[in-house]
Image (cartoon, helix red, strand yellow):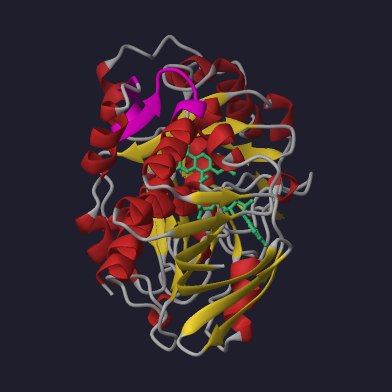
C-alpha cells in the first residue's frame, strides 16, 4: 500500500489532522490500536467535552520552550474550531473563563471529526498494531498487523500516558528515543494530589467540601516555574482535588509545598472592618466566606473555639488571618497516570519545526498533540493544542 500520509493515533489530534489532510487532497491512512476510537474525547469535560477555550493563548501552556506554541496557535484559533462546530450544528455554551462545552455530549465532537475524515476520504483502520516505522528511500515504511504501507509523511499522534485503561501508551516517546530525538522528563499533570495522613492534619474528614481559593505552586528555578490560580478547591478522602489543585499539580514537584489562601481574592481586613462582626464567634467570622465545617476546623486548630470576635486580641486575630490565608501543605504525591488528565513533557520541541511539527532531523516525520512537550492549563487548552498542532502539520504536509 502506498499513501501520501499515515497518521498513527486516532484521538483528538490524529482524527482532526487526518481530516484536514484528506480535505487538502492527500491520500491518508489513519491507524489506531484501540477497538473504540475517541475514548478520551468521550470522557472529557465530564462527558460534555470542553473542546476549546476562547481565551487560549501561549500563556496557557507549559513547555520548556514556551514560544514553540505561538505559530500553530496563531494559525488555528479557538474561533476557527468554534466555527467548525457551528457548521455541524453542534450546540455549545461557555462556562467559566472562556471554557466551551457541548450542550449535549462529547459524542457530537467525535462524530464531527469522523465526518471530517469521511469528507477527506480518510481510510481509518483499527484495531491495528504498528510494529515498526522506518525511513526507506525518502519515504516512511510502516509495518503493521494489516501489512506494510509506504508514505511520504508519517504523523505520530499517539498522545500521552494518562488513563492507560483506555489505550494510552508511550509509543511516541519510545519511537522518538529510538530515533535519537530528545524527550523531556514526563510526569502526570492536571492530577489530584495525595497526602500522608499526618501531613493532612485531619482535614480528610471534610471530604466533599469545596471552596474558592488562591493557590500557588512550583518554584521559579524549576522547569516550568511557578504559577498562581484562583479556582475552586475540593477536599477528598485521598487529598486535594478540584480545578485549583489540578492546575497547581502541573507546576508542583515532589518534595515541594503548595500555598493556599482560603480567602481567595477577598480582602479580609476590609470585610471584617466593614461588617459588624464583634458579636460573632470566631467561627462565625470565618464562616462569612468559608464553609462552616472548614471554619470550625481552623478555629479548633487555633484553640479559639466559642470565643467572640470582639474578645480576640490583635495577635489572635492575626493568627486567624494567617491560618486561613497562608495554609501551607506538602503533598506526598499525585494520584498518578490513572487519574491525570494530561502528560507534562514529551518530545522535545527543539527537535520540531514549530510551523509544521516536522522533526528537524527527519524529513516527513511529524509529532502532534499531547506527545509533544506542550501541556495546556485546565479548561479546553489541551484540545485547542490538539487541533492547532494537527492543523499546522496538515498544512505543512499538503504544502510539501
Ligand atoms: C479524564 C480526562 C478529561 C479531559 N478533559 C479535557 C477537556 O475537557 N478539555 C481539554 O482540552 N482536554 C481534556 N483532556 C485532555 C485531552 O483529552 C488530551 O489533551 C487530548 O485527548 C490529547 O489528544 P491526542 O490526540 O494527542 O491524544 P489522545 O486523544 O489520547 O489520542 C491518542 C490516540 O492514540 C492511540 N494510540 C496510543 N498508542 C498507540 C499505539 N501504540 N498504536 C496505535 N495507536 C495508539 C490511542 O488509542 C488514541 O486513540 C482530558 C483528559 C482526560 C484523561
Instruction: State the image coordinates of residue 248 (x, y, percent, origin top left).
Output: 49, 50
What residue is at 32 percent from the left and 50 percent from the top?
Answer: 23
Return the residue found at the far front.
Answer: 1
Instruction: State the image coordinates of residue 41 (x, y, percent, origin top left).
Output: 53, 38
Residue 20 appears left or right of 207: left
Residue 70, quarter of the rendered image: bottom left
Nearest the eye: 140 or 42? 140
Q: Is residue 171 above or below residue 36?
A: below
What residue is at 45 percent from the left and 26 percent from the top?
Answer: 108
What residue is at 58 percent from the left and 64 percent from the top?
Answer: 253
Count of numbered circles in the view? 0
Q: Quadrant of the N terminus?
A: bottom right
Nearest the eye: 252 or 84? 84
Residue 159, quarter of the rendered image: bottom right
What residue is at 71 percent from the left and 43 percent from the top?
Answer: 35
Q: Which residues are magenta?
A: 91-108
Q: Is residue 168 above or below residue 187?
A: above
Residue 392 appears left or right of 138: left
Return the residue found at the far right.
Answer: 197
Nearest the eye: 39 or 122? 122
Q: Quadrant of the C terminus?
A: bottom left
Magenta segment includes 347 = no
Residue 16 appears left or right of 126: left
Instruction: State the image coordinates of residue 135 (x, y, percent, origin top left).
Output: 54, 85
Magenta segment includes 93 = yes
Instruction: State the image coordinates of residue 193 (x, y, percent, origin top left).
Output: 64, 47
| Whether residue 210 can be seen here | yes
| Whether residue 318 can be seen here | no
Amino acid at each position: 500500500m502506498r499513501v501520501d500520509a499515515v497518521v498513527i493515533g486516532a484521538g483528538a489530534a490524529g482524527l482532526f489532522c487526518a481530516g484536514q489532510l484528506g480535505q487538502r487532497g492527500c491520500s491518508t491512512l489513519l491507524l489506531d490500536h484501540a477497538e473504540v476510537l475517541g475514548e478520551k474525547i468521550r470522557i472529557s469535560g465530564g462527558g460534555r467535552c470542553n473542546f476549546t477555550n476562547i481565551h487560549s493563548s501561549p500563556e496557557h501552556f507549559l513547555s520548556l520552550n514556551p514560544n514553540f506554541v505561538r505559530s500553530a496557535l496563531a494559525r488555528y484559533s479557538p474561533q476557527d474550531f468554534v466555527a467548525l462546530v457551528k457548521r455541524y450544528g453542534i450546540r455549545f455554551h461557555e462556562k467559566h473563563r472562556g471554557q466551551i462545552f457541548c450542550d449535549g455530549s462529547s459524542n457530537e465532537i467525535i462524530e464531527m471529526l469522523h465526518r471530517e475524515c469521511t469528507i477527506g476520504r480518510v481510510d481509518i483502520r483499527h484495531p491495528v498494531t504498528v510494529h515498526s516505522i522506518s525511513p526507506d528511500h525518502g519515504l516512511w515504511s510502516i509495518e503493521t498487523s494489516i501489512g506494510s504501507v509506504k508514505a511520504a509523511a508519517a504523523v505520530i499522534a499517539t498522545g500521552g500516558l494518562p488513563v492507560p485503561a483506555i489505550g494510552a501508551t508511550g509509543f511516541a516517546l519510545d519511537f522518538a528515543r529510538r530515533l535519537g530525538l530528545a524527550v523531556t522528563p514526563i510526569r502526570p499533570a492536571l492530577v489530584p494530589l495525595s497526602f500522608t495522613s499526618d501531613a493532612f492534619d485531619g482535614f480528610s474528614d471534610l471530604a466533599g467540601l469545596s471552596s474558592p481559593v488562591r493557590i500557588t505552586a512550583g518554584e521559579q528555578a524549576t522547569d516550568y516555574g511557578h504559577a498562581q490560580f484562583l479556582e475552586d478547591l475540593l477536599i477528598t478522602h485521598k487529598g486535594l482535588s478540584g480545578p485549583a489543585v489540578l492546575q497547581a499539580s502541573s507546576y508542583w514537584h515532589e518534595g515541594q509545598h503548595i500555598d493556599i489562601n482560603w480567602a481567595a481574592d477577598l480582602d479580609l481586613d476590609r470585610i471584617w472592618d466593614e461588617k459588624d462582626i464583634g458579636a460573632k464567634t470566631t467561627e462565625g467570622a470565618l464562616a462569612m466566606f468559608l464553609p462552616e465545617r472548614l471554619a470550625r476546623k481552623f478555629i479548633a486548630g487555633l484553640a479559639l473555639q466559642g470565643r467572640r470576635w470582639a474578645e480576640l486580641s490583635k495577635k489572635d486575630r492575626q493568627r486567624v488571618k494567617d491560618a486561613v490565608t497562608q495554609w501551607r501543605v506538602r503533598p506526598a504525591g499525585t494520584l498518578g497516570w490513572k487519574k491525570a488528565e494530561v502528560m507534562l513533557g514529551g518530545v522535545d520541541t527543539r527537535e520540531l519545526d514549530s510551523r509544521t511539527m516536522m522533526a528537524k532531523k527527519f524529513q516527513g516525520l511529524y509529532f502532534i498533540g499531547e506527545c509533544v512537550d506542550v501541556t495546556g492549563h485546565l479548561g479546553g487548552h489541551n484540545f485547542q493544542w490538539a487541533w492547532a498542532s494537527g492543523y499546522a502539520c496538515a498544512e505543512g504536509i499538503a504544502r510539501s
